[in-house]
Image: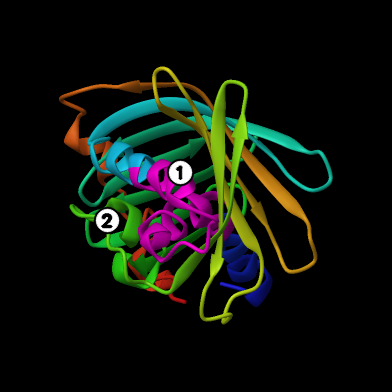
Amino acid sequence: MTRNSSDFNRRRLALLLAASAASTPAWAQTTTSGPADQALVARAVAYLEGLTEATSRFEQTDARGRRSTGALFLKRPGKARFAYDPPSGLLVVSDGGVVSVQDNRLKTFDAYPLGATPLSLFLAKSIRLDRGVAVTRVTRMTDGFSITARDGRKETAGTITLTFADAPLALTGWTVTDAQSRPTRIQLLDLQRVSGLDKSLFILKDPRPKNLGRGKV
């Protein structure tokens, strides 16, 4: 595997997973203005912890306005599948222990320990509240609210904003803004709670011949 292809997968994985994973667990360390904001944060955390199985279509829009679409399958704790539509060729799967990233266009396959990715925080059975991320803003809208978070230890630049609809409460998407103020938005299209998702959705094996070696970070 070349360095460029590995870097490509790192960027794509980070864009897709960072918001849904990194921002939720640290909401207890809120720097918001008062009890009303903190109540919204607590409500959002309770909602996410109760979202055990779900499916959704998603649309990703990057900082240049380029769009791609795909399907999300979620089974907490531990499991998720992000499948981009053609011609992307990207598939990201967490099986509960490993996050695998397969790119059919680049013919690459990378494996990351789930515990070493932000996804592990979101997929945990109980969302942890002591991971060093600070909520910087809670914004109310006519039909919902959004919560913006950053790395409280300032080891990672950028911010993450999760957006929720109200009545009923539902996650509608997220936006990752990097250190250069470039936003990437994921919009969830009709998130649905489900039950009994097929276990095979969360299994992804390296399809390459063994003599090519395994992709590692």
Res. 216 in view? yes
What residue is drawn where x is 23% and y is 62%?
97
Q: Amino acid at mark 2?
A: Ile
Q: What residue would you read off at disc 1?
A: 36
Principal secondary structure, stretch drawn in magenta: helix
Check disc 1: other Cα within 10 Å, few if <14, some if 14-19, many if 20+. Answer: few
Amino acid on which disc 1 is placed: Ala
Q: In the image, what residue occupies the spot 63% across and 66% down? A: 5
The answer to the question of whether label 2 and label 1 lie on touching residues, with beta carbons closer than 8 A, is no
Total marks placed: 2
**Picture coordinates of residue 72 (x, y %)?**
42, 33
Label 2's element? loop
Give the structural element (helix, strand or loop) at label 1: helix
In percent of width and height, residue 141 lies at 62, 29
Residue 177 vs residue 9, the one in the foreground:
177
Q: Is any atom of residue 86 visible in this view?
A: no
Q: Is residue 192 above or below residue 74?
A: above
Q: Which residue is mark 2?
A: 127
Left or right of residue 86: residue 121 = left
What's the colour scheme?
Answer: rainbow
Residue 33: in magenta span: yes
x then y, percent, for residue 32 = 53, 57
Q: Is residue 78 left or right of residue 170?
A: left
Indicate whether residue 23 is drawn in magenta.
yes
Name the N-terminal-most of marks 2 and 1: 1
Q: Quadrant of residue 26?
A: bottom left
Q: Look at discs 2 and 1 and give the one toward the viewer.
A: 1
- Spot occupied by residue 195 in the image (x, y as percentages of width and height): 18, 23
The residue sitting at 63% across, 70% down in the picture is 7
Q: Residues within 10 Å of mark 2 (few under 14, many from 20)?
A: many
Q: Which residues are magenta?
A: 13-42
